[in-house]
Image (tube, rainbow, N blue to C red):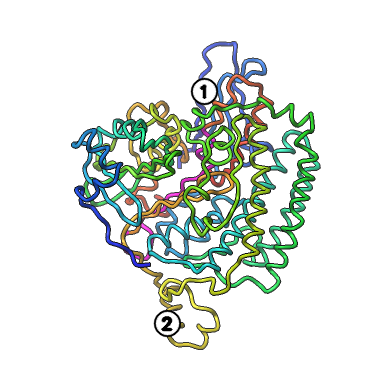
């Protein structure tokens, strides 16, 4: 096989500038992102992101799997918010099937989704602060994140690749002490956010590194398809949880933090506020979680409980059929977008009436947000690139798929 | 929740402002429409795509000002083989709309949307890389996921899942 080449295309016209390479192995690119920087002294003239190092062809693999087998693939796209991806995919297939999930299942999904958002934002906050030079925050954030991962482990058996949401509900009823543990974590969490904010929000070193850096205007953000906190920090008030509610989000009260400033500091403030809002949603979900089943009553789609499967012939037959030949999904196509911690996570699923999806496309927020990087950084110093990358919060697994 | 049958009759779908708006702009540009599972898709004639997007973006009431996604589906062995799919979103009305363009299998090409939304750049490069659909007037139409000297377009249906060995 011929040797594979990567795109090295930045032709420099004059001797005034030079091209340097940042990444793909670089601690502050948050994964395997390669940036080609054309610089004039310390100033950036042009910047070109080069991605694809983590491309694993997940969309192609999905076409060869049964619908239910795609769920674990979705974990692996954005490894910081696996449950969000599970949810987006499950909602898309449920929409294709016309399946309604019982309220308890929906509430659980919302609760876990907000915990995932907290988890993802904690990693962002820790690494972003560390890029700027504040080491302590990283340790504090990972201390809380550890608690969230333990909650995920309790509910799904896995710390990161959870696959807990299934088509038609969630995998199993959570363990008995689960809600108490979530409550304990959630009640203590606002104090922790105060702690992070105490270290950062008014810290002159941190503020000077972030204020007026990597500015992006409202118009540019929209034109460049920015999404999520990056878009909201530039003054466009879009949050799909509120604007296109899914999974019962219309029953929850929360604010959508926005800012009109559009610099790195604004994006920092928006995300920190989101931590507090997510905490409130988890509290509401804990308080109002309804009784009942966590799975839809659809024996041809949802696997039966273990006990039923072992004692009832009919359940055994359904179990056998779902596992061996999957379930068929009526022809059609849907685009289901949800608000992931990074922005709009959309799944476009096409069914041709068989048990395997004809096409699964993931519209990932990191991929869209990465395009704003050149606009943010050109004309600024190299050191600002690190702050800008941290502020758009990309996950390269999500970007490359 | 039973599924309702899809509505494909253009006359019936005129009640949707999006369909009415495009028909009023250029009736020849609309090849068809579908309303299914609460989602509206409009088939747009290949050469009219850019005009249709501009019309929808500038319409004061509809205001489809954001491009959410571009992707493609390969319907081999059908002809036209490719469907390029555009998801538009309005930050004002918070509604989604799907535009589709049908392309034939040999030398598929469609106008790039980068003059309207510069952010279409990456999405179109991805479709070019994985499906081999060309986008006219794209500023940098190169592979984005696969290496530059890769042979074939992996998401086409005639490309084996394990790849060529």
Image x and y of residue A19, in percent: 59, 21
In front of the other: label 1 or label 2? 2
Question: If the image is split into quadrants, where does the N terminus of chain B sit?
Answer: bottom left
Parent chain of label 2: A
- Rendered view: A390 above or below B38: above
Q: Is residue A182 magenta?
A: no
Q: CA distance from mark 1 to mark 2?
A: 60 Å
Q: Which mark is residue A252?
A: none
* Residue bearing the label numbered 2: A317
Q: Quadrant of residue A194?
A: top right
* Residue bearing the label numbered 1: A10
Image x and y of residue A205, in percent: 78, 29
Image x and y of residue A141, in percent: 74, 48
Residue closer to the observer: A331 or A181:
A181
| Residue at 49% over, 53% down | A245
Q: Secondary structure at mark 2?
A: helix
Q: Secondary structure at mark 1?
A: loop
Choose the circle earlier in sequence order: 1 or 2. 1
Q: Is residue A357 magenta?
A: yes
| Residue at 26% over, 33% down | B48
Mark 1, other Cα within 10 Å: few <14 / some 14–19 / many ≥20: some
**Residue A64 seen from this side:** yes
Q: Which residues are magenta?
A: A352-371
| Residue at 45% over, 35% down | B122
**Residue B149 seen from this side:** no
So how many labels did they put on this image?
2
**A234 lies left or right of A191:** left
**A188 lies left or right of B76:** right
Parent chain of label 1: A
**A139 lies left or right of A367:** right
Mark 2, other Cα within 10 Å: few <14 / some 14–19 / many ≥20: some
């Amino acid at each position: 096989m011929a040797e594979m080449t990567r795109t090295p295309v930045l032709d420099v016209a004059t001797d005034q500038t030079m091209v340097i390479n940042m990444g793909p192995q670089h601690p502050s690119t948050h994964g395997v992102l390669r940036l080609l920087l054309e610089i004039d002294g310390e100033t950036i003239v042009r910047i070109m992101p080069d991605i694809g190092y983590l491309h694993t062809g997940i969309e192609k693999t999905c076409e060869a799997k049964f619908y239910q087998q795609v769920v674990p693939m979705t974990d692996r796209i954005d490894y910081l918010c696996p449950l969000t991806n599970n949810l987006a995919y499950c909602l898309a297939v449920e929409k294709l099937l016309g399946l309604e999930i019982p309220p308890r299942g929906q509430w659980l999904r919302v609760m876990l989704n907000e915990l995932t958002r907290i988890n993802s934002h904690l990693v962002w906050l820790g690494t972003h602060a560390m890029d700027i030079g504040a080491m302590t925050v990283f340790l504090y954030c990972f201390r809380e994140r550890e608690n969230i991962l333990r909650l995920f482990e309790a509910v799904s058996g896995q710390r990161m690749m959870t696959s807990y949401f299934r088509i038609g509900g969630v995998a199993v009823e959570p363990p008995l002490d689960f809600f108490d543990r979530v409550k304990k974590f959630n009640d203590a969490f606002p104090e922790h956010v105060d702690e992070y904010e105490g270290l950062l929000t008014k810290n002159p070193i941190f503020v000077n590194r972030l204020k007026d850096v990597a500015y992006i205007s409202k118009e540019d953000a929209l034109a460049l398809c920015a999404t999520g906190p990056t878009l909201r920090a530039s003054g466009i008030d879009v949050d799909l949880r509120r604007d296109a509610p899914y999974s019962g989000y219309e029953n929850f009260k929360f604010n959508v933090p926005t800012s009109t400033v559009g610099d790195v500091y604004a994006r920092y403030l928006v995300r920190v506020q989101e931590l507090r809002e997510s905490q409130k949603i988890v509290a509401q979900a804990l308080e109002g979680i309804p009784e009942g089943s966590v799975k839809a009553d659809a024996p041809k789609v949802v696997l039966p409980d273990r006990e039923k499967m072992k004692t009832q012939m009919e359940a055994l037959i359904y179990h056998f059929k779902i596992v061996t030949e999957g379930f068929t999904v009526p022809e059609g196509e849907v685009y289901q977008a949800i608000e992931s911690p990074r922005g709009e996570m959309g799944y476009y699923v096409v069914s041709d009436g068989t048990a395997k999806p004809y096409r699964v496309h993931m519209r990932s927020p990191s991929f869209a947000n990465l395009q704003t990087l050149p606009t943010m950084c050109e004309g600024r110093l190299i050191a600002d690139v690190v702050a800008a990358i941290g502020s758009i919060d990309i996950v390269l697994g999500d970007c490359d798929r | 929740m039973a599924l309702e049958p899809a509505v494909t009759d253009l006359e019936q779908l005129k009640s949707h402002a999006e369909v009415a708006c495009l028909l009023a702009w250029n009736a020849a540009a609309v090849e068809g429409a579908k309303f299914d599972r609460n989602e509206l898709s409009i088939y747009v004639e290949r050469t009219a795509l850019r005009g249709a997007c501009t019309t929808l973006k500038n319409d004061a009431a509809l205001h489809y000002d954001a491009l959410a996604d571009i992707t493609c589906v390969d319907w081999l062995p059908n002809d036209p083989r490719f469907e390029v799919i555009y998801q538009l979103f309005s930050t004002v009305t918070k509604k989604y709309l799907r535009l589709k363009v049908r392309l034939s299998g040999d030398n598929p090409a469609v106008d790039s949307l980068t003059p309207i939304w510069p952010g279409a750049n990456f999405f179109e490069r991805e479709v070019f890389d994985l499906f081999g659909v060309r986008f006219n007037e794209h500023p940098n139409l190169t592979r984005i996921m696969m290496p530059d000297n890769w042979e074939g377009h992996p998401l086409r249906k005639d490309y084996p899942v394990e790849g060529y060995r």
